[in-house]
Image (cartoon, rainbow, N blue to C red):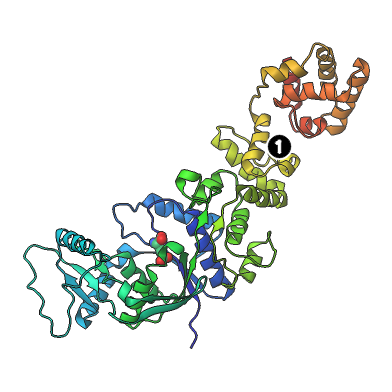
Amino acid sequence: MTRKVRTRIAPSPTGFLHLGTARTALYSWAYARHFGGEFVLRIEDTDVARSTQESVDQIMASMKWLGLDFDEGPIYQMQRLGRYSEVIDQMLAAGTAYRCYCTPQELDEMREAQRAHGEKTHYDGRWRPEPGKVLPAPPEGVAPVVRFRNPPDGAVTWDDLVKGPITISNREIDDLIIVRPDGVPTYNFCVVVDDWDMTITHVFRGDEHVNNTPWQINIFNALGAPLPLFGHVPVILGDDGQKLSKRRGAVSVTAYEENGYLPQAMLNYLSRLGWSHGDEELFSREQFVQWFDGQHLSKSPAQWDVAKLNWVNAHYIKQATDAELSVLVAAQLQRRGIEADAQGALVGICALFKDRCATTVELANWAAMYFADVQATAEDLAAHVTDAVKPALITLGDKLANVEWGKPGISAAIKETLTAHQLRMPQLAHAVRVLVTGRTQTPSVDAVLELFTAGVVLARLRSA
Ligand code: GLU
């Protein structure tokens, strides 16, 4: 019987949702949606010292922002400790796990001796029960760990959804510690119990876990649990070819939200990073779900490319309605301490500037001049607000004070001023731009001025 597709994302709440994890979440989510299955959010919080509620909140907020709705969860591992000890007890009773009383010092000595003999370091199995073997008496005062009794022979093989067939000899694999001396079970064990209990059928995760999979498969088998399929997605590299990391720029989903990227652009860009559907570069979330069937995942690392991300974001900014953008830009302005009504002039401002912006931060850079004072550079003022133009600025101010405020009236006032002072358009337009907007380059002056109130334009012109 084929099982209902169930996927999961299992972030550790020790920081923000990393871009790599977000991409894996996207694949897991889309795979479940594509096959009419279910997607589970599990919080792997057994690293108690480093896990925080703030991280959980950030992870949830990032998932929500990306539109990754889950059908179950969040399920917290720390709330499942009872279940883990139940399984540990079963494994101890069945002989698939055993207590090991080696002290850290003994383990050090063991490794030292192995190195001295030119051997690869490994656990030598001194507490591992074998038929006919007499184990030492447990020493007093040593809190034991529990180790998984890995099969001694044979090999672990799985057909990775991304990498293809992988085989690892069991002789390469140590008896893994599955419960620490403090009684808290370890990642490779919890993940198996969870994936089993949560009837996960497909595990997509980062490449860094590929070495954990043989252990996990052996533990699944020891428990008589059905195996999920595994897909290990290659890392994302930064522009410098090194693994994307905090030191090399923003790696959290939250940072991209703050930096003015739209969720639909992030979804599009992230999903395309390591997966393709023909030559398609721009696609909606619905298309992504329709196309994503776990095929065409790239085996080689993907390269983070800010220029491409900006191109994708610019596309979605153009596509967004002015009213949608206005809300986002108002939020950006608020971060700078500038209050702007998202339903007011900001809508028209977004309409005028969105074609030249890759992010809502850039859009907010334009919008700011409408809601806060501007300051042109001394060079621009000297170059453009010249004595030759100043009389014309006075005429223009007088004319603008009397027009019906809007593009036709403003345009007519500018033309009349040019004629009266025998000036060319660029001379006057540059001076107006510098004074009113603080910049030398803008869309056409009448369109830019129209979105200010007449009062602000006159005050800035008369400041010359
Ligand atoms: N907590 C692990 C991580 O954040 C999850 C690995 C897995 O998906 O099995 O990397």
Q: Quadrant of residue 151?
A: bottom left
Question: Viewed as shown, does residue 188 lie left or right of 362?
Answer: left
Which residue of the protein is positioned furthest toward the bottom in this rendering?
Answer: 1
Residue drawn where x is 31% and y is 70% of the image: 189
Check disc 1 and report the residue beneath it.
345
Q: Helix or strand or loop: what does disc 1 sit on?
A: loop
Q: Quadrant of the C terminus?
A: top right
Q: Is residue 74 above or below residue 126?
A: above
- State the image coordinates of residue 21 (x, y, percent, origin top left): 48, 59
Task: Give neighbour class at mark 1: few <14, some 14-19, many 20+ (Cα, 10 Å).
Answer: some
Q: Quadrant of residue 225?
A: bottom left
| Label 1 CB less than 8 angstroms from ligand 1 | no
The residue at 54%/37% (across/down) is 335
Observer-nearest residue: 28 or 127? 127
Name the spot of residue 446 as percent of width and height, x first.
Answer: 82, 31
Vertical arrangement, residue 21 with respect to residue 443, above or below: below
